[in-house]
Image (cartoon, grey):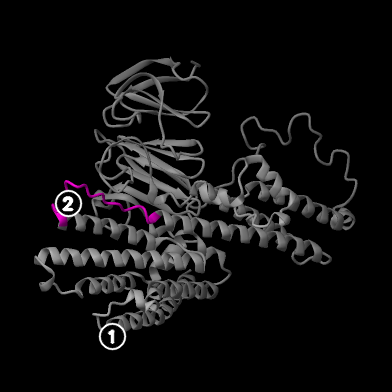
Amino acid sequence: ADKNFWLWGSWGKRIIKIPFLTQKVSGRIRDVIIGPTFIVALREDGTLVSWGEDKQGCLGLGTDIQLCTEPKPIPFPTDFQGKVVDIQYGKHHILALTNHGKVYSWGENPDGQLGLNDLQTRYEPNLVEEIAQHPITQILAVDNMSYALTKSGVVYAWGENKDGSLALEHDNPRVTKPEPMYRMFSKESQVKKLQIKESGGMGNKQGTKTVVAFVELADPLSDKEKIGGFEHPLGEQPQGADGPVLSENDEKEIFEGVDLMAKVMDNTQAWWTHMNEVRHGSPYQDNPTHNDEYQEAAGKEDGCTALQLDTFVSLDRLERASNELDMLIQSAKAQLSEFKEKKGTKNVKFMLCMFMDDCKLRREKIRRTIAARSLIDSRGMSTTQVSTLDYGQDEVNRLQSANNQLHRTLQKVKNQRTYDVFTKTLQDSIVECIECKLQVHENEIEILKAGGPKQVEPVKSALRTIKERWGDLKRFSIYNFFMECKLHGQEWEYKSEEEFLAFLVSSSDQRIDGIISRDKDQQFSRDLLVPSLAYDLLVENAELRKMCNTYQLKVMIMGNEQKKKLQSEAR
């Protein structure tokens, strides 16, 4: 093993008065966690090892290993990808952040600080699924509390909330899954970095810990400002030492046109090559005579067609491919803005726009594939096996248990984002199938409870479905959609509040239409024993809510404008 680190001071119940050198881990170490009786080390390659004694799961080695004298690798789930770049230790739980922006947790969980929507102790790393869709850039663990900062500047908090210490604006003593801190949603005060500050205690009292969220951060120190820094690298000729050969204006006049074309051509060629290396979202090879050299070379390399890749690779890999295409679009868009007002760049602009459209079409195809596969996978989530020994036994409870699973699946399918007509139609079809299955189960339960079919009211299950659809409309509001857009940083993509307003109203109307659209297939969605008036009232409620959404958001924006006006006058 290599020389790792020196250790001294208070450690658990011991006082180390003389520094001793730890030489346990092979290779270089990036960070360590020092627990009362154990150590967890983050190695340079992004893997974790642990050793020592711990009965509350912080070793991360499973339930069978609570004592380990030599470092052992901490196992992550089989679908884990990337490497760990940061680890944080709370009172007795651990958070790990990967280079893909995913958060894993393990250890004690009495207050839900693991973020896994329960209070069970974990002895191995588990993915915090609630924030898995958001790229996380930083994590913090403070006592029995946990925090995560997203790339868009949103702070999530979970764990112990005694006396409202998580600042989530509610007094639930335990928060078992990450919740966004809405108060800090603002374009003007976007959070850049989280930090824990400890204040010294007074007298015999212990110090306290305070979480600080930095909004405006100074730029990193330049090489010149760093300790021992120099104005330019040693041995390099200082700029301008021999005098300028050409003035800036002369150079601009001579090289502007040629340099611009060469730059765009080189960049676009590199981006095009990278886009073809990504492969996901590329056209399917339904006609071999239409294949180009890039498709043929890629297919020979791995022996897979584009359709096979989109069908069998993990959804995380497709998400990463979508993000890479988005980065290419942003790069091309940024370069297009560089010479937007310049003359003589018509051909260059045309080439960049064609490249951006290709990337957008591929990204849309990937998103459609992700949505379709997620919806298809959800159909197999709920399965209840009935053995021959269970036949005729405890049938009501078995049906109710199956209904609970179906309700969870139904909610997950409804929450799944769709991107086009195909995935929206698929979503509606799966919802209708699940609702029909629920109605069948409800009728069977009523028959079993009544002791026979003669005393059952057959409309109960159909009315229950109408009630659930009504509840979906009631729970949805334009304010929630507005906050969801802020959570993803979408409002920053629009030039004005009027443009953002038009987007919100249009999107909210589409969501309400999506809830009610399944009623168009009346042959399947309506029950003939229920008066049509009940379904018509549901449609009328949706239309009224669409009208209210427009006025609600207008009032919200007018209030914001009035607030800003008062603040400016006060200054």
Percent position of residue 237, x then y: 81, 34
Rendered residue at 49%/36% (across/down): 85
Percent position of residue 88, x then y: 40, 36
Q: Amino acid at mark 1?
A: Leu
| Badge 2 density bin: few <14, some 14–19, many ≥20, Cα 10 Å | few
Name the residue nearer the viewer: 245 or 515. Answer: 515
In this rendering, the answer to whether 252 lies above or below 555 is above
Gap between marks 1 and 2 measured at Cα: 40 Å
* Front disc: 1 or 2: 2
Q: Secondary structure at mark 2?
A: loop
User: Looking at the image, how many numbered discs can be counted on the residues?
Assistant: 2
Q: Which mark is residue 378?
A: none
Please identify the dominant SS of the magenta region.
loop
Which numbered disc flags the more N-terminal residue, 1 or 2? Answer: 2
Percent position of residue 271, x then y: 70, 50
Query: Is 154 inside the magenta-drawn segment?
Result: no
Name the residue nearer the viewer: 410 or 71. Answer: 410
Rendered residue at 38%/51% (across/down): 130
Q: Which mark is residue 391?
A: 2
User: Left or right: 371 with respect to 11?
Assistant: right
Q: Which residues are magenta?
A: 378-395
Rendered residue at 47%/30% (across/down): 47
Q: Amino acid at mark 2?
A: Tyr
Query: Is 391 inside the magenta-drawn segment?
Result: yes
Q: Secondary structure at mark 1?
A: helix
User: Left or right: 550 with respect to 246?
Assistant: left
Rendered residue at 32%/30% (across/down): 62
Percent position of residue 547, x then y: 41, 82
Q: Which mark is residue 533?
A: 1
| Badge 1 density bin: few <14, some 14–19, many ≥20, Cα 10 Å | few
